[in-house]
Amino acid sequence: KVSGIEKITADLVESLKIKNDGQGDKIGALDKAVQNLVNFIESGGEVDFIIPDEETEDEDGNGKGPNYGNLRITFQEIRQLETKIKLLESSNT
């Protein structure tokens, strides 16, 4: 579990381009958030995530907001994995 949390945190740090030097507090906060999320899910919690149907504009009024399409796909994959895990757990009992 610990190595999984470390891997998730490292992947997030890399994808968010957080620098180790000078931004250690951000990395620590991110690591704690990942730990809390894993503990929450392990105890039976579910994360709800609602994204807009349409792309939004950024702060400058440009149409370059976050790529919600990728987030939708990622959350669909997470839900599929959760379903498979529940099926495996129920077949083991």
Image (spheres, rainbow, N blue to C red):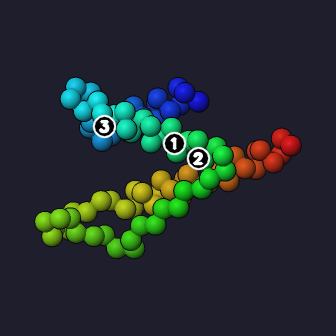
Instruction: State if disc 1 and disc 3 touch (CB < 8 Å).
Output: no
The local crowd at label 3, few if under 14, some if 14 to 19, many if 20 or more residues have their Cα within 10 Å, is some
Q: Is residue 72 left or right of residue 62?
A: right
Q: Position of residue 92 (x, y in %)?
A: 83, 41
Instruction: State if disc 2 and disc 1 touch (CB < 8 Å).
Output: yes
Q: Amino acid at mark 3?
A: Lys
Q: Position of residue 70 (x, y in %)?
A: 40, 56
Give me the C-alpha separation between circle 1 and circle 2. Answer: 6 Å
Give me the C-alpha separation between circle 3 and circle 2. Answer: 21 Å
Residue found at the very far bottom of the displayed protein: 53
Q: Which mark is residue 36?
A: 1
Q: Amino acid at mark 1?
A: Asn
Q: Is residue 88 left or right of residue 32?
A: right
Residue 55 found in image quarter: bottom left
As displayed, is residue 73 above or below residue 11? below
Residue beneath label 3, please?
26
Q: Position of residue 85 (x, y in %)?
A: 69, 46
Residue 14 visible in the displayed image: no
Front residue (pair 75, 6): 6
Residue beneath label 2, please?
40
